[in-house]
Image: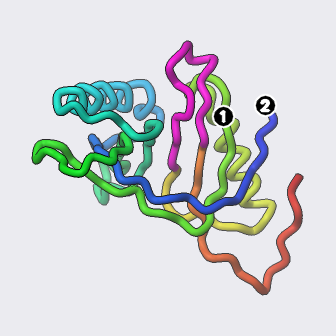
Amino acid sequence: MPDYDVIVKPLPAQHCAVRTERARAFDQTLGEILPRLYGELGAQLARHAITPSGPSIAWYEDSGEETWPIRVIAGLPIDAPEVPDDLEERTLPAAARGATTVHRGSMDDCAAGYEALLRWTEDTGEHIEGYSREIYLECDGPPDTWVTELQFVLGPRDIGRAVPSVR
């Protein structure tokens, strides 16, 4: 299993053009949903001559529906002063603290990175708020060369509780 270092850092807000869809489970998101959403979103931005201002971002929310419980959001950061009406925009909120790690390789094999983040939160007594975020830092080449930052927003820290150090 690869070694995953966990870093706690502030997570900046990102204003994005987005496409959204609901999913039954996370195993659908990468193989079926995200590639299609990014293709549609990229084509839509190209029609409007808008160039993304940063790497692709995916994040997930509770949809509030039992059958399709996960809302999948595919986002491309934009800095366009005016955005066409047919383009959906959302801002991924900033977080004061996020637990992050870097996954190298295909997203089909990212489970170990998420397991490392979850193990770290258990070991340190931290708690996660909401679903994960993924920043696709390098995803232009073959999947085995991809670099993705995996993120979880952390809840407020309990100052009265000692937190062990993590290497």
144 inside magenta stretch: yes
Query: Does 35 sit left or right of 110 as displayed?
Result: left
Residue 72 figure quarter: top left
Query: Does 158 sit left or right of 24 as displayed?
Result: right
Residue 53 figure quarter: top left
Q: Give the image's coloring scheme.
A: rainbow
x 37%, y 40%: residue: 76
Q: Which of marks 2 and 1 precedes in the sequence?
A: 2
In this figure, what is the number of numbered marks? 2
Name the residue carrying label 1: 103
Q: Read off the magenta span.
A: 133-149
SS class of the residue under badge 2?
loop
Give the residue type that dot 1 points to. His
How far separated are the C-alphas under marks 1 and 2? 9 Å
Mark 2 Cα shell of 10 Å, populated few (<14), some (14-19), many (≥20): few
Query: Does 152 sit left or right of 118 as displayed?
Result: left
x 72%, y 59%: residue: 121
Position of the N terminus, as image quadrant, is: top right
Give the residue type that dot 2 points to. Pro
Q: Where is residue 117 in the image (x, y as percent from the top left)?
A: 69, 50
| In the image, residue 64 above or below residue 2 | below
72 inside magenta stretch: no
Question: Which residue of the protein is positioned furthest toward the bottom in this rendering?
Answer: 160
Residue 63 figure quarter: bottom left
Q: Where is residue 55 in the image (x, y as percent from the top left)?
A: 47, 37
Name the residue carrying label 2: 2
Question: Which residue of the protein is positioned furthest toward the front in this rendering?
Answer: 81
x 71%, y 81%: residue: 158
SS class of the residue under badge 1?
strand
- Tell me whether the residue at label 1 lies in contact with that at label 2, contact meaning CB atoms closer than 8 angstroms: yes
| In the image, residue 73 above or below residue 3 | below
